[in-house]
Amino acid sequence: MTHQEHAHDDDSTLGRLYRQLKRVATLREQMRAHPEDQQDRDRLRQWQADRLGRTHRDLLESDRYGPAAEFFLTDLYGPGDCARRDADVIRVMPTAERLLPESGLKVLAQAIELDALSEELDYLMVVALRRIDGIDPITPDHYTIAYRAVGEQARREHQISLVSELGMTLDRLARKPLLGATLKLVSGPAHLAGLGELFSFVERGYQVCHQMGRANEFLETIASRETAIMTALFNGDSSVLGRGLSRDQLPE
């Protein structure tokens, strides 16, 4: 059985990927139709990226965890967007099915689902910040008020769990000795076929996790910190937005 036949035989990964692609394409179209939304969304994302940098500064500065932290906090969630990567997936999906291993397609499906969920929550935050005239500039107090107004705790929890889910998928890939060779083997054909952006994304994720070693502690640290911050924000505590956290400094 060929890889493509296997991929279609097991529809869970491809089905998830196509569903999330449609979801994110709709969001992108709405954003393009309203440039002011794009501008405010970018302002919010930059503010949130700066907050992530403060919260996880120790991970970003760590020799072991630094590259992985940069990937998870910047590649997955940064002030820009993943529109080019997502457009690549839509445009060359049949070729991607042939060249990427099933595990690579799963990474893309998880990343695009995270991207779509983040876009939806960010849009709700932009609307809430505008209502309190808090979008420019954004302050910790404005952010906390908007965060509580938006609510969506279950989806916030799912957002955190998606980061862990994607991280564990990459961690499993990084421990497959033949996968690195496979990625190198198909790197040339993938770039020639127009899959450069999305292939590089999968390859970067593999490389940083391979370099880091076991990802459990790293992913647990991010999840526990982000969960603690979520809880604090829902309780109205904006102080967690302005400082770094360590394991023994997590809010109750």
Image (tube, helix red, strand yellow):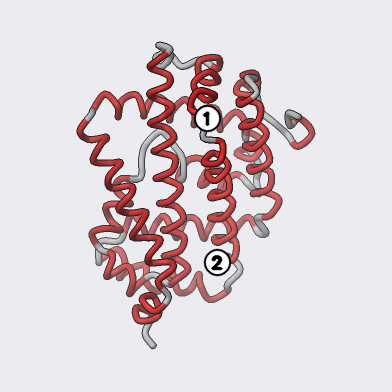
Q: Is residue 4 above or below residue 123?
A: below
Question: In front here: 208 or 244?
Answer: 244
Label 1 close to label 2 by CB (< 8 Å): no
Residue identified by numbered label 1? 151
User: Dot 2 lies on which element?
Assistant: helix
Give left or right: position of 182 versus 25: right
The N terminus sits in image quarter: bottom left
Q: Is residue 8 above or below residue 201?
A: below
Give left or right: position of 74 versus 82: right
- Which residue corresponds to the image point at 65% horizontal and 45% vertical from the top-left? 63
Question: In front here: 63 or 98?
Answer: 98
Give left or right: position of 178 versus 130: right
- Which residue corresponds to the image point at 27% horizontal and 52% vertical from the top-left? 87
Give the percent coordinates (x, y) of residue 155.
52, 41
Question: In front here: 188 or 38?
Answer: 38
Give the percent coordinates (x, y) of residue 94.
27, 70
Corner quadrant of residue 244: top right
The C terminus sits in image quarter: top right
Outermost residue to the left: 33
Residue 173 marker: 2
Reading the chain from its start, which is encountered first: label 1 or label 2? 1
Q: CA distance from mark 1 to mark 2?
A: 35 Å
The local crowd at label 1, few if under 14, some if 14 to 19, many if 20 or more residues have their Cα within 10 Å, is some
- Which residue corresponds to the image point at 45% horizontal and 60% vertical from the top-left? 203
User: Dot 1 lies on which element?
Assistant: loop
- Which residue corresponds to the image point at 33% horizontal and 47% vertical from the top-left? 24
The local crowd at label 2, few if under 14, some if 14 to 19, many if 20 or more residues have their Cα within 10 Å, is many
